[in-house]
Amino acid sequence: MMHLTTVVGARPQFIKAAAVSRAVREIFSPEITERIIHTGQHYDHEMSEVFFEELQLPRPEVNLAVGSHSHGKQTALMISLLEKEFLTNPPDAVLVYGDTNSTLAGALAASKLHIPVIHVEAGMRSYDKSMPEEINRVLSDHVSTLLFTPTETGMRNLKKEGLVHHRGAFHDPDHPVIYHCGDVMYDNCLHFQALAEERSRILEEYGLEPGRYHLATLHRAQNTDDPARLTNLFTALLEITHASGKKTIVPLHPRTSSLLRKSVPDPLLKALMAGECILATPVAYFDMLVLEKNAHLILTDSGGVQKEAYFFGKPCIILRAETEWKEITATRSAILADADPKKIRKAYQRFESSPALSFPPIFGDGHAASFICRTMLDCLG
Ligand code: UD1
Ligand code: UDP
């Protein structure tokens, strides 16, 4: 029996973890036990609890309740508390997802105790170290023993950094195992789509008609913490809303919500508050799937939402200067527009004037999670 400890802490990690936890429960329960530790990085009901309720993700055995702090303090608190947990209940391996401070803390605490680290969504790079996530990704990958990358680009990035697949029988961070296995978020999208459509009432709740609204999300520090960029982004969203005659719904991350009130000029804030864009609280995952599936177009700086736009065959305007998801932009179904209203308008017009887009399968076959579990057992079990 392999004793796995999964470390999660932020919204996209609860969603990613749901896929692997499901595979553990439904296929691998005779061979793997899973213990979930929540760092407490995200703590609002709609940023955390709602996902455990909806996605049948087992409740965390422990919540470290670390909360919001500066990066150094938040990560340090997590490392110190995780180390204690790993010493009290030593796992055979620690599983981390993506690129948040919770990912880095889990990877560092485990690797220093010589516990094998499994990194799902390894190899993604923006090559911009001013982005906190880039530091988290690079460091987590380089202390991991099993690395699962969702895309070909991820595989190439790892090889460029000297991380090669070790073919021997023994594996540690110096002899890692590296696989391109598809994306667990795609597994989830396929698994939950029908149930989401059955359960969600989000379109009725906000008076949205399929194909007659845009969906926008933004929460990256680069966008929210710079008042000029935040102002540009909301100005562009308002312009597109007015020019198209379609509504725009923006489920606001708490970071964006508080900075919006502080940072954008009064007239813009008033227009937004008057309902010219629909500013919503963060929505649950099923609601988000339904919003994505029925949107006319998606604008986002989120990694996960870029991918989900692609899963649902939607044009996407990426509100960043670069993306880790190069396969998506290569299909031209998504355009990088940064926080530049001119580029955002131009991208919108391009999609309106040539709406035929193609979405070849680049995120696997919907079974990434079971591949990950099988490989964990083969290499570490
Ligand atoms: C974090 C991740 C980011 C990921 C995002 C997913 C890092 C460095 N960043 O960014 O990669 O894309 O999660 O959503 O780990 N807040 C609340 N309630 C909450 C959580 C946060 O009010 O439940 C507010 C706090 O003011 C906090 C701020 O949001 O200071 C930022 O939260 P934090 O977890 O530090 O970063 P995110 O922007 O959420
Ligand atoms: N998401 C959600 N509700 C929202 C916004 C996003 O359920 O209000 C989901 C979204 O569908 C995707 C994930 O959260 O599965 C993406 O997380 P986020 O944008 O917070 O982080 P990122 O992917 O950029 O790290």
Image (tube, rainbow, N blue to C red):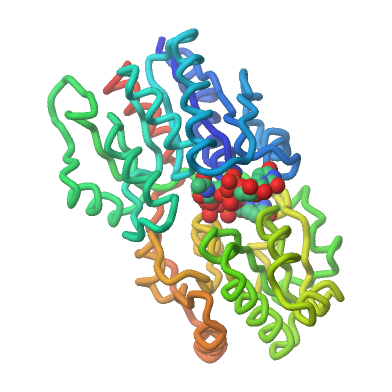
Vertical arrangement, residue 149 with respect to residue 296, above or below? above
**Is residue 106 found left or right of 291 in the rendered image?**
left
Residue drawn 36% across and 30% down?
118
Viewer-proximal residue among 57 and 69: 69
Q: How many marks?
A: 0
Residue 14: which quarter of the image? top right
Is 380 left or right of 165, judged from the image as shown? right
Q: Position of residue 110 (x, y in %)?
A: 38, 23
Q: Is residue 194 visible?
A: no
Image quarter hosting the C terminus? top left
Q: Position of residue 150 (x, y in %)?
A: 37, 48
To which quarter of the image does residue 341 belong? bottom right
At horizontal 77% and vertical 66% (from top left) the residue drawn is: 279
Residue pictured at 44% horizontal, 68% vertical: 359
Query: Along the line of sight, which residue is nearer the eye, 4 or 47?
Result: 47
Q: Quadrant of residue 297?
A: bottom right
Q: Quadrant of the N terminus?
A: top left
Q: Does any portion of residue 126 appear in the rendered image? A: yes
Which one is nearer the viewer's eye here, 308 or 173? 173
The correct choice, above or below, for 363 with respect to 33 in the image is below
Which residue is located at x 70 percent, y 53 percent? 254
Q: Is residue 278 above or below residue 353?
A: above
The answer to whether 84 appears left or right of 44 in the picture is left
Residue 48 placement (x, y as % from top left): 68, 38
From the top left corner, tell me how far across and down residue 171 is, in percent. 21, 23
- Could you tell whether 353 is left or right of 260 in the image? left
